Image (cartoon, rainbow, N blue to C red):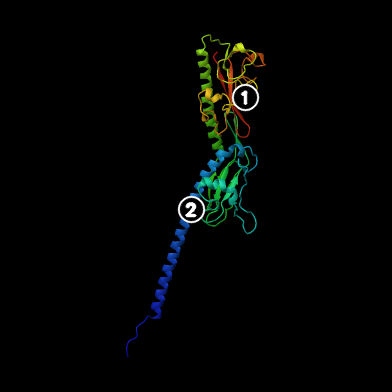
Amino acid sequence: MKKQLGFTLIELAVVIVILTGLAVYGMEGLGNALDFKSRVDTDNRVKAWRKAMESVYLDNSATIDVQTTAILKLVSTTTISPAMPATTGASIGKCTMVAASMLEFANRGGYSATDMIQDGHHNSFCLYITPRLSTTVSGTTLYYHTVAIVSPGRNGKVDAGTKLDAAGNLILAAGSDDIGVLFDGRKFATDRYNQTIAAMQRTVDAYSAYYAARYQSDSTRSLSNDYFSCGATTCPSTVARWDTTSEMISTCTNAIEMVQTTGTSPHTVLGLSRLDVTDGWGNLFTMDNCTDAVRSPASTIAARQNPPYTAQISATLPGGSVLSMTAVGQI
């Protein structure tokens, strides 16, 4: 009889075990690769959120920081509310962010709105916003909100203990796979304040230099004249005490913005650009060289009618705080 060729049951079992092991190993490797890609995608979108939040907050801080509640009110009148984890039901720990309300962030982050609101695991990001907070810098009260974006991670749920506390600190639950990024409104406000101080000081220095130049160029110079103004407008009644050939407009009715769209503009008289007379939040400085808030010949307060004359540069910060510096004429 011819010998039959084939596999024994034991040989088949060994082959099946080997193939099963290879399949399991391959699936595990594929799963690890997919998980790695999801984490990379999440990290990239978190970075996009950071970039977008800084940009949106800068352009909208004047309206955002006026609000006392936990919302982001944009100039476009869009109001963004927090997207917090559900606390009950089947969706506990999950968030629902609406793509339509996040278009401005998506545009600046470089993603579509649908992709922007989802992490790499296709779970909705969570959005935390504090009510308006405040801090004091050099005696000036600054207002701000702190905002956090949190990915619930692979398990799709924000773990208990992850939160944005009342002081604006982002706390991630110990041992969780949550990933978050914090936009620190306090640091933002402080940076913008410092920018404002620097720009305002440059404006005041330019104004003081203008006064000195006008004084030196007057062959009949007199310390009793107000060289801050006011040849660009009708001078008040005490004409003899004004620099009537000055280009600078007087502000005896009320303070005005440093950039005027018609007539003589104060910033051009001082040789400054629009950016030079803009605060850290993008708002123009105001100028006053003639009301009772400063010293001028037109003051209704007798003690302020005599030199040294002054001009005041001011900025109204988001939330209502007013910051001012004074340029002083020669004594």
* Residue 247 versus residue 164 in the image, above or below: above
Q: Nearer the viewer, residue 261 or 22?
A: 261
Q: Position of residue 219 (x, y in %)?
A: 51, 9
Residue 194's tag is none
Asked if residue 221 lies left or right of residue 11, the reply is right
Q: Is residue 288 left or right of residue 41?
A: right
Q: Give the amino acid at mark 2.
A: Asp
The label number, if any, that marks residue 41 in the structure image: 2
Instruction: Point out the residue furthest to the right here.
Output: 300
> Which quadrant of the figure contains the N terminus?
bottom left
Please give the name of the residue rendered at 52% of the width and 12% of the height, measured from the top-left corner.
218
- Does residue 183 appear in the picture of this structure? no
Mark 1 or mark 2, whichever is nearer to me: 1
Q: Which residue is mark 1?
A: 255
In three-dimensional space, the C-alpha distance between marks 1 and 2, rounded to whole angstroms, equals 52 Å
Q: Residue 76 appears at what percent x and percent y? A: 61, 42
Residue 215 visible, this angle? yes
Q: What's the residue type where badge 1 is placed?
A: Ala
State the residue at coordinates (52%, 31%): 195
Picture quarter with the C terminus: top right
Q: Nearer the viewer, residue 161 or 179?
A: 179
> CB under 8 Å between callouts 1 and 2?
no
Residue toward you, 291 or 8: 291
Q: Which quadrant would residue 293 be assigned to in this image?
A: top right
Vertical relation: 124 (above or below) 184: below
Q: Position of residue 29 (x, y in %)?
A: 43, 62
Percent of width and height locating residue 206: 51, 22
* Helix, strand or loop for disc 2: helix
Q: Dot 2, how many residues are within 10 Å of its Cα: few (below 14), some (14-19), or many (20+)? A: some
Residues 149 and 72: in front is: 72
Q: Secondary structure at mark 1?
A: loop
